[in-house]
Image (tube, grey):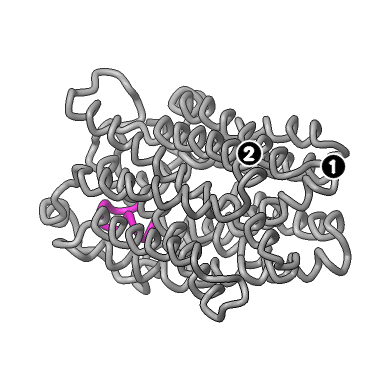
Amino acid sequence: MKTYELRNVGVLRKTKEEIRLSIHYVFLQSSYWLSACAVNGFASYYLAAKGFGEGQIGLILAAINILLLISQPFVAQFADQSVRIRIKHIMAASMGMAVFLAGGMLLIPRGSLLFIPIYLLLLVLISMNGGLLTTLSSEHITRGTRLNYGLARGIGSVSFASMSILTGILTKRSGPNITMAAFMVIASIFIVAVLRFQSPEKTRIQQKDTPSLNLTSFVKGHPRFMLTVFATFLMFLSNNMVSTYFFQIIERVGGDSTSFGKAVAVAAYIELLSMAVYPAIKRYLGSHAQVMKLAAVAIFIKTLLILHAGSVGAIYRAQTLQFFGFGLYIPAQVYYVSSIISQHDQAKGQMFLGFSGTLAAVFSCLVGGYLFEHIGIYATIMLTSVLSLVGIFMLFFCVEKDAMEKR
């Protein structure tokens, strides 16, 4: 398989245009994660405050991820193949609709028939923009622009952390509706910023290589990559089980919404550090694929530590493993896809690897909600941990060899 050279991982000798572009992208990451935290980050809390039970919350979150699974492939194909409508236009339109729906959530009572469908569509639109924001950077990365995705994403994590602390405090004082109001303000700023972001001309990209593939051709043409996607799905199962019911886990050891916000913040601040030094870690390990392996093991260990935590403090300590876990995995998978997938198929490549996490979330919500209520959280996470361990072993053997070459 063809390997695409990456020249952006370093931060030295950037041009003024690259510096300006990087600062703009940092702002996009920051404003997006601020807005996403207010709604998506507090989804289980919001639903619990509106009177939904754990099983119902699991079904609702599963429905959100199922809708993402259905819609994302088609959005990714459209984003890759459309020349006139760019990714930033899709992002602005979908976030604009999300702002409108968030306003509706402030007016619609919980018992209304419109409550669930509007809430589902709202979270789907917000979540979809996370993947598109990644593809927005890969458009430049594959062209050799030295845009440090890891640092920008790390600042996004810190923004998420800061917002989680603030939202935890505000919800305790003002109730769940404050999350929707906060989202509307921040998302409006994001829309303006993303429309002003500079995107490369797609016509020039497509003249340099073969045409963009449709979804079927992409899957058939990248068999080993698709095995990596499946391995990542298995690897994420136990971690997503913890993430889905993280608020409930914290409650069981004596915490509250403020503790939840602080626990999320600990992990996010740690992420910034690891993402900022990602280029050095990648150089030490030799490839983006090797970093993915290290991160997968760290994510698995963190999950087990949280499962066996007996106090909120123990959960805080487990969250520090985010440095070697998601803090490294997030930029590693972005650069990994950029190194092995053609420039104009980046939206599909980034989508499929992100797809694995979404599919794991669906499994966690549908199966996890049932198991959570019938056999308890410990047995549920231990069961999925076995599958996650299988996924880690698969990941070690199916990552693309081309991506493991030292650069």
Q: Residue 176: image x %, image y %?
A: 60, 54
Question: Measured from the top left, where is residue 173 in percent x and y?
Answer: 64, 43
Against 221, is 281 above or below? above
Quarter of the image where one finds residue 9: top left
In percent of the image, x 22 and y 29: which residue is there? 20
What residue is pinned by disc 1? 254
User: Is residue 343 part of the magenta span, yes or no?
Assistant: yes
- Magenta region's main secondary structure? helix
Between 218 and 23, the one lying in front of the other is 23
Instruction: Residue 261: give x, y in percent of width and height.
Output: 65, 39
Please state the extent of the stretch shown in magenta in the rendering: 341-349
Percent position of residue 80, x then y: 26, 61
- Image mark for residue 169: 2
Residue 291 in sight here: no
Q: Residue 30's quadrant in the figure?
A: top left
**Image quarter (top left, top right, bottom left or bottom right) of the C terminus:** top left
Amino acid beneath label 1: Gly
